[in-house]
Each structure stands twice: as structure tokens, then as C-alpha cells.
Image: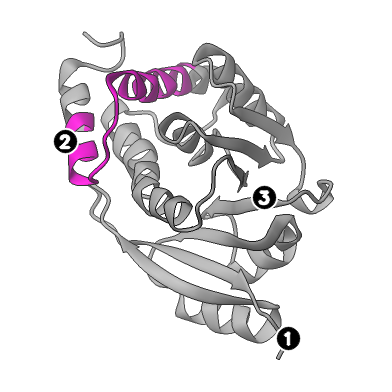
């Protein structure tokens, strides 16, 4: 047994997912991912942090789904020649994808923000349990946060692209990006974003999440150089 919740088969599934996603995950990182989910499912019994309660489903829909953005993030970081990367994860919930990013990309400083106090308390607990000094959590509405410059601001099904840009855009530093995790390519949201904000879609990247029979994409957004 790996833990009292996750088995050696779950660990093999995680190994395979990392391989499918071309991620060079260390044994320690994989152990941390499983421990994160173990803590999440234990807390869930009392605090109702996520609707997903079955271990394999949580592994796929939480961890594999979040792992799918790691390779694109690493590529972006390399292309931008960034050293220490500041990431703000908006509407982070129980820390998705923020905790997974903090585990898999140690040279990031990840701040999770959510309005629900018990979820941010959980993320702080995880930072301590997993000794993730690069992970912090703030209970707040993103629009009420003091504006600070982040290289990347992420969201996973937080809101529409327009709302995401309008509420979180001020936290993106010059030449930084907004990064929205979406299901199907959100054509109408993109049209509204281009029309109603000073942000535009730089590229859309389709994701293949291991064992997840659903469409996923990443929407990379940059600030327009001039308002149209």
C-alpha cells in the first residue's frame, strides 16, 4: 500500500500519466502528489472541499487534469528565460492547479487565492505537510487583492474569460500572461474577450489528459499593445 487510500496500482497509474504527458517527475514529486490527494480526501469527509470522493476519480480529474498544464508551463518559462516565476492561481479551490504546479515546478512561487476560507486553510496545511516553501494561500476575492506583478495568472474553470481578464488582469506584470484552463474551445468567450477587454488570445493549446474522456484546452492571453 502507498497510503491507506492510494494503492500501488494508483501509483502505477500516476507513473503512466507522467510518461504520457512527457513529464520527468521524481519519485518525491509523485509521492507528494499522492499525499496531497490523501489529505484532500481525508479533509473532504469533514470540510466538503470537493465533490469528488473516489480515489481514482480524484487522481484523474484533479491531479492528471492539473498535470496536463505542466509541460506547457515549463516550455513558456524556458522560452521567456524566467528564473523565479511568480504564479497566482485564481479561484484555486482546494489548490488546483496551484498545489500541483508548486510540487512539479519548484522554482515557482505559487499563491492560491479563493474566497472560501476552509479551502485556503487546507492549502496552507498542505504547504506545511509537503514542506512546500514556494506555496502560499490567501482568502480573498481576487479583485480585492493588492495588485502585485505576477508572471502568470492561472484559473481552472474560475469564470468566463472576460470576467477572468477584468478581475485578475491587473495582477499580471508587463509581458506576463493570463492562462485559462477550459473544456471545449470557448469561441463565444474569446469573441467577447477581444471585444470587451484590453486582452487578446495569444494562442489556444489543446490538452490530452490521461484517462479523461473530455476535451481540455489552455487559453493563453496577453494584454493588447493598444486598445482597439
Tell me the residue that label 1 is attached to. 227
Nearer-the-camera pick, 93 or 146: 146
- Please report whichever mark, 3 or 1, sits nearer to the chain's N-terminal start: 3
Q: Position of residue 216 (x, y in %)?
A: 35, 60
- Left or right for 56, reference 66: left
* The N terminus lies in quadrant: top left
Real-space CA distance between mark 1 and mark 2, rounded to the nearest whole angstrom: 45 Å
Residue at horizontal 48 percent and vertical 31 percent from the top? 106
Real-space CA distance between mark 3 and mark 1, rounded to the nearest whole angstrom: 22 Å
Q: Is residue 203 above or below residue 33?
A: below
Q: Which mark's residue is nearer the viewer, 2 or 3? A: 3
Tell me the residue that label 3 is attached to. 150
- Please report whichever mark, 2 or 3, sits nearer to the chain's N-terminal start: 2
Query: In what element is the residue under mark 2?
Result: helix
Q: Where is residue 36 in the image (x, y as percent from the top left)?
A: 43, 22
Residue 22 part of the magenta segment: yes
* The C terminus lies in quadrant: bottom right
- Please report whichever mark, 1 or 2, sits nearer to the chain's N-terminal start: 2
Q: In this view, does 43 lie above or below 149?
A: above
Tell me the residue that label 2 is attached to. 16
Residue range in magenta is: 14-42
Residue at horizontal 29 percent and vertical 39 percent from the top? 60
Q: Do the residues labelled 2 and 3 touch (CB within 8 Å)?
A: no
Mainly helix, strand or loop, the magenta region? helix
Residue at horizontal 15 percent and vertical 22 percent from the top? 9
Query: In what element is the residue under mark 1?
Result: loop
Amino acid at each position: 500500500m502507498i497510503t491507506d487510500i492510494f494503492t500501488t496500482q494508483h501509483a502505477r497509474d500516476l507513473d503512466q500519466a507522467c510518461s504520457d504527458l512527457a513529464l520527468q517527475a521524481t519519485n518525491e514529486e509523485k509521492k507528494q502528489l499522492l499525499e496531497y490527494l490523501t489529505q484532500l480526501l481525508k479533509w473532504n469527509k469533514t470540510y466538503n472541499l470537493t465533490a469528488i470522493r473516489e480515489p481514482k476519480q480524484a487522481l484523474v480529474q484533479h491531479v492528471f487534469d492539473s498535470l496536463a498544464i505542466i509541460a506547457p508551463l515549463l516550455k513558456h518559462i524556458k522560452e521567456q528565460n524566467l528564473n523565479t516565476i511568480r504564479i497566482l492561481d485564481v479561484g484555486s479551490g482546494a489548490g488546483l492547479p496551484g498545489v500541483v504546479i508548486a510540487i512539479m515546478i519548484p522554482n515557482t512561487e505559487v499563491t492560491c487565492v479563493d474566497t472560501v476560507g476552509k479551502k485556503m486553510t487546507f492549502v496552507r496545511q498542505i504547504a506545511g505537510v509537503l514542506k512546500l516553501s514556494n506555496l502560499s494561500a490567501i482568502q480573498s476575492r481576487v479583485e480585492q487583492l493588492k495588485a502585485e506583478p505576477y508572471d502568470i495568472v492561472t484559473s481552472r474553470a474560475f469564470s468566463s474569460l472576460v470576467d477572468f481578464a477584468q478581475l485578475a488582469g491587473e495582477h499580471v506584470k508587463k509581458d506576463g500572461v493570463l492562462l485559462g484552463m477550459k473544456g471545449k474551445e470557448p469561441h463565444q468567450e474569446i469573441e467577447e474577450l477581444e471585444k470587451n477587454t484590453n486582452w487578446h488570445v495569444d494562442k489556444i493549446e489543446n490538452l490530452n489528459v490521461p484517462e479523461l474522456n473530455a476535451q481540455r484546452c489552455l487559453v493563453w492571453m496577453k494584454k493588447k499593445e493598444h486598445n482597439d
